[in-house]
Image (tube, rainbow, N blue to C red):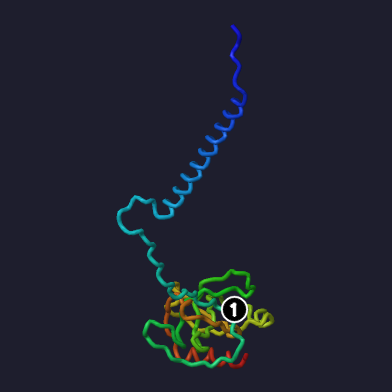
């Protein structure tokens, strides 16, 4: 039996129909994707209530600033003796503060400091040391370091005599004061102040 011949144009019609099917499927996929994007943009489309809105952020508060570092004071010094037992550092009192080394390499030490005056809102003070510099006073003087005895007091738990370095005046922000030690006697304070004036 002779094989049946396909009518002319059958393959062309089939190809066109297949092409139309793929095109329609592609358009349907694009439509589904677009609808999904719109639904996500409306918050998912599953809520019966109004579209939730994000609460506004609170207004930023003032930026906290760190108290300034302890620095060397090269300006004029107006000294005064005015200790007050009020919990705040005052001239004539010995307080504790972190004092940087003269090398300015970021290192320092927590030391007792004699407050001798003010510079605006800052305190002016002299670092104390429990080392006896009388033994090497000449060598210290050659290096530009001068010390005055201030005696003993509750600022040193071991009761060691202290000396104030009178050639280096420190500028200290009140917020950098760790704690108060005690008030120096007026007589001792006047001796220290006289040496500060002589050197400056």
Q: Among all residues in the image, which is located at the extreme right?
A: 142
Image quadrant where residue 18 sits:
top right
- For the N terminus, the quadrant is top right
Would you call the spot at circle 1 few (<14 residues within 10 Å), some (14-19), or many (20 or more)?
some
Name the residue: 53% across, 93% down.
78
Q: How many marks?
A: 1
Residue 79 rendering spot, x and y as whole percentages: 52, 92
Residue 71 position in % (x across, y down) = 57, 79
Label 1: which secondary element: loop
Q: Position of residue 44 (x, y in %)?
A: 39, 51
Task: Please give left or right for residue 2 compared with residue 110 in the image.
Answer: right
Q: Nearer the viewer, residue 50 or 121?
A: 50
Q: Could you say which is closer to the camera, residue 128 or residue 82?
A: 82
Image side of residue 183 versus residue 125, left or right: left
Residue that appears at 59% across and 81% down: 72
Q: Which residue is mark 1?
A: 133
Q: Which quadrant is the C terminus positioned in?
A: bottom right
Horizontally, residue 122 falls left or right of residue 50, namely: right
Above or below, 98 against 126 in this view is above
Residue 73 versus residue 156 in the image, above or below: below
Q: Depth check: 19 or 121 in front?
A: 19
Compared with 156, 43 (above or below) is above
Which image quarter: residue 89?
Answer: bottom left
Point 51% across, 42% down: residue:
27
User: Whole-percent x and y of residue 153?
Assistant: 44, 80
Residue furthest toward the top? 1
Front-lying residue, 137 or 27? 27
């Amino acid at each position: 039996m002779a094989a049946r011949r396909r009518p002319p144009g059958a393959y062309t019609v089939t190809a066109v129909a297949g092409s139309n099917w793929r095109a329609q499927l592609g358009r349907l996929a694009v439509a589904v994707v677009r609808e999904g994007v719109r639904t996500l943009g409306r918050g998912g489309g599953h809520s019966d209530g109004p579209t939730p809105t994000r609460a506004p952020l609170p207004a930023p508060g003032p930026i906290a600033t760190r108290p300034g570092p302890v620095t060397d004071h090269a300006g004029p010094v107006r000294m005064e003796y005015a200790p007050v037992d009020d919990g705040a550092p005052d001239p004539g009192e010995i307080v504790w503060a972190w004092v940087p080394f003269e090398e300015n390499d970021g290192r320092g030490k927590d030391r007792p400091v004699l407050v001798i005056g003010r510079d605006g809102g800052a305190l002016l003070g002299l670092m104390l040391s429990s080392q006896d510099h009388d033994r090497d006073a000449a060598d210290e003087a050659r290096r530009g370091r001068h010390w005055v005895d201030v005696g003993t007091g509750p600022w040193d738990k071991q009761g060691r005599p202290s000396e104030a370095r009178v050639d280096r005046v420190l500028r200290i922000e009140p917020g950098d004061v760790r704690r108060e030690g005690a008030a120096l006697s007026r007589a001792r304070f006047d001796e220290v102040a006289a040496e500060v004036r002589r050197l400056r």
